[in-house]
Amino acid sequence: MKRDRDGRRPRVAICAAALFVLAVPMSLQAREVEQQAALAASSPTSMCIDKDDTAPATRIVACTVAIDAKTLKGRELATAHLNRGQAYRAVGDRDRAAADYGAAIKLFDEATSTASLDASQFLQRGIAHHALDDVDRALSDYDEAIRLDTGNALAHVDRGILIATRKADMRRAIGDFDRALALTPDNVDTLILRGNAYTSVGEHGRALADLDRAAALAPDNPRAFMVRGLVNARLGDMQRAFTDYNMALSLDPKYVDALVNRAAILSMRGNIDKAIADLDQALALKPDHALASYNRGYAHFARQDYQKAIADYTNAIKADGRMAWAYNNRCLARMVAGHDLAEALSDCDEALKLQPDNVQTRETRGFIFLKLGERDIALREYEAALRTDPDRPLALYGRGLVRVAKGDLKSGEADKAAARALMPGVERQFTTYGVK
C-alpha cells in the first residue's frame, strides 16, 4: 500500500501467498517416528514409494532403509531418492534434499538409455528439476507427462505452479489449474492455487469464489484463509482481511506470511507495538523473510526510530536485492535522520533503476537535493514526479519551496497553496525533515 496523502510514510507491504508444506509439531513427529519406525524397517519400499500419506520423518527412515538395502534399481531407485528428497525438504533439510533430487535425475536419465520414461516418471523427473530450479527442463518434463497422460491432475498442477512462479504467466497457469480442477473438482490445494492466480491478475471475484469454496471444504486449512485475506486486502476490505489472517493464525500460530500480513494492517491502523510483535515472531521463525524485515522497518519508521528502520530495510535488501521499495524507504529514513545523505541518494538511485517511474522516489530525491542546496536538481525531481501525478502535495510544496528560493515568488506560492489545499499541514512534513 502506497504512502497516503495525510503524511509522508513509507510503503507497507502485504505479501502474496506462499504455498508450503506445513511443518508437523516436533513432539508429534517424534511420536510418529517412534510408532512407525518398526513398520518402516519391516516394509521400507511400501512406506517410501507406495504410501502417499507417510509422514516426512517416517518416509526418510523408510527410504533410507530401502536405498541402503541396494535392492532397488533404475526408476524405482530414482523414485525412492525423489520421495526422500521431498521428505527432507518438508523438514527443512535443503542440502540433503538437493542431493536426493540430483540422484533421482541421474537415475531417470540413465533409465532413458534403455526405454522411454512413462508419464508418471516424466512427472517425477520434472518435480526433481523443479525443486532444483531447473525451470526449462522441469517444464519440458511436465509437458511430456501431460502429452502422455492428459488426465494426470498433478502434472497440470505442478506445471501451473512452475509457470506462475517462474514464468510469471498467470493466465497460462490458470489454464492448468482449470484442467486439474476439471479432473478433481474438490481439490482444496488447487482451488487455493487458482484463487491466488486469479487475484494476481485482478480477478478478485473469481479468486474469492475459489477461496470461499476451499475454506468451506477444509475449514482447518490455514492457507485458504491466508490467501483469502490477501484478496480482501487487495479489494481494500482490511477488516475482512484482518479476520482471515487471524483465522489462519488460530489454525497455525507459526504461519509466517499471515503474521507479516496481519502486521501490515496493524501498522496501517497505527497499532505499531502489536505490529512489531507479529514481525518479531515472523523473523524469529524465518530470519531471511524480506517482507517481514521491510514491514518492521516501516513500523520502526512510524515510531521515528530511524536507525532500527534503516537496519530492517538493510536486512530486507540482503534477503531480496531487487526490493525497490526497501531502497526507497531506506533512502527516506537516512534522509530524515539527517545524515548519510550520499548513501541515501545512492539508495534512491538504486530504487529508480528498479522502478524508473516511482514518483515517491522522485519526491525523496527532491528532499535530499533541497537539503544539499542543489535547487536546480531538486526542481527537476519534483517536476518529474508531477508529470506523472500533478496532484502530489509533497511534490507541489517542494517545487514551491524551490521556486521561491530561486526568486519565482508567484509560481512558488501558487504551488504551496495548491499543496495545502490537497493536504492541510503539508509544510509540517518538510519542517520535520529539516527543510524550510
Image: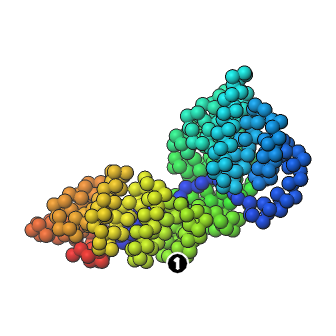
Q: Is residue 331 above or below residue 157?
A: below
Look at the numbered disc 1 and give the secondary structure of its residue: helix
Relative to residue 434, is residue 251 drawn left or right?
right
Residue at the image position 20 percent from the left and 57 percent from the top: 380
Q: Is residue 120 above or below residue 296?
A: above
Quadrant that contains the C terminus: bottom left
Q: Return the residue nearer the eye: 310 or 206.
A: 310
Quadrant that contains the N terminus: bottom left
Amino acid tagged 1: Asp
Residue at the image position 52 percent from the left and 73 percent from the top: 276
Q: Is residue 303 above or below residue 335?
A: below
Residue at the image position 63 percent from the left and 51 percent from the top: 94
Q: Return the residue nearer the eye: 40 or 387.
A: 40
The percent position of residue 408, horizontal first and vertical second, equals 11, 66
Q: Which residue is mark 1?
A: 273
Q: Is residue 395 visible?
A: no
Q: Which coloring applies here? A: rainbow
The percent position of residue 196, horizontal first and vertical second, equals 59, 50
Q: Return the residue nearer the eye: 54 or 423.
A: 54
Relative to residue 56, is residue 345 drawn left or right?
left
Farthest residue, direction top: 114
- Total of numbered circles in the picture? 1
Name the image quarter holding residue 104: top right
